[in-house]
Image (cartoon, rainbow, N blue to C red):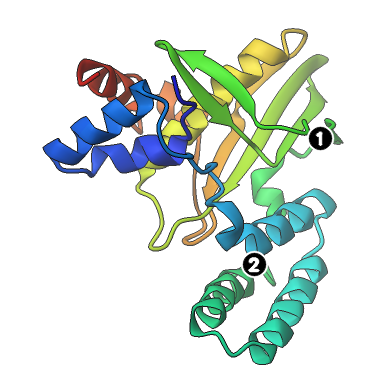
Amino acid sequence: MKKLSIKEIVEFRGKSDRSKKNFANEVKLNKEKIQTESGGDYWVSCLSAISSGYKANDVLLITARRLELENKHDATDFNRTKTMYERNISILRNYEDFNFKVWMPINELKFMKKAKKNYLLTIKGFLIQVAPQHVFTFQQNDVNEVGAIWFIAKLKGFKEDELGMFTDILYRYLTANFKDYTVNSKYCIAVDVFSSKYVNYFQLESREIPKILDSTLNAIKALM
């Protein structure tokens, strides 16, 4: 069976009945290359810069990337490439004076070494990619805790319940891989960089935002 990204699971929900059936068959038959949640190379410039800015808590890294992209934009004659740069630049401008501490605990963070490849988590028989930019540990009230942040991008952004699917899989990833730590649900975060909207797992626990990952996977499985 083909591995899935959360982004493709999100997209499944908006497909027509016929397209949903075709998608389910492609997954079952291991057809087509499925892109990662980050959206492939299209958004990599803004995502990597925001990720670096977050880790260093330094918005100057974002400004530097924006200036770099502006130079590349001016140097190319291809309209599609110019559009890609313009969209990445537009996102970066929104973070040049951003306070990243709103997505961090006040405690000192230790960033864990990033895995070389996307981690695969099995849920309901599906292999699902998990690719947060950062996993970090910290101590709070003498308890060793772990959190993570996942920056994602899509033109026009994601709905809150869709962001909740990223947060849901992220929480399961942390629970499965950091057994010596307590997962802090408030700092298990998915961020839509297009809108700066974010969802943490606490919002799913408190039912402020519905959990729709399992039900969506059940819908895919029913069509296979």
Residue at (20, 40) in percent of width and height: 19
Q: Residues within 10 Å of mark 1 (few under 14, many from 20)?
A: few
Q: Is residue 175 above or below residue 12?
A: above
When asked about the image quadrant of residue 175, the answer is: top right
Quadrant of the snapshot with the C terminus: top left
Residue at (51, 14) in percent of width and height: 122
| Amino acid type shown at disc 2 | Tyr
Frontmost of labels 1 and 2 is: 2
Determine which of the numbered discs, if any, sits on residue 62 in the image: none
Element type where label 2 sits in the image? loop
Mark 1 highlights which residue?
107
Residue at (33, 30) in percent of width and height: 26
Q: Position of residue 118 (x, y in %)?
A: 66, 32
Residue at (65, 45) in percent of width and height: 103
When asked about the image quadrant of residue 157, the answer is: bottom left
Q: How many marks do you count on the picture? A: 2
Element type where label 1 sits in the image? loop
Mark 2 highlights which residue?
95
Q: Earlier in the sequence, mark 1 or mark 2?
A: 2
Q: Position of residue 124 (x, y in %)?
A: 40, 11
Quadrant of the snapshot with the N terminus: top left
Label 1–label 2 contact, CB within 8 A: no
In depth, the one of 139 and 174 nearer the eye is: 174
Q: Position of residue 84 (x, y in %)?
A: 54, 73
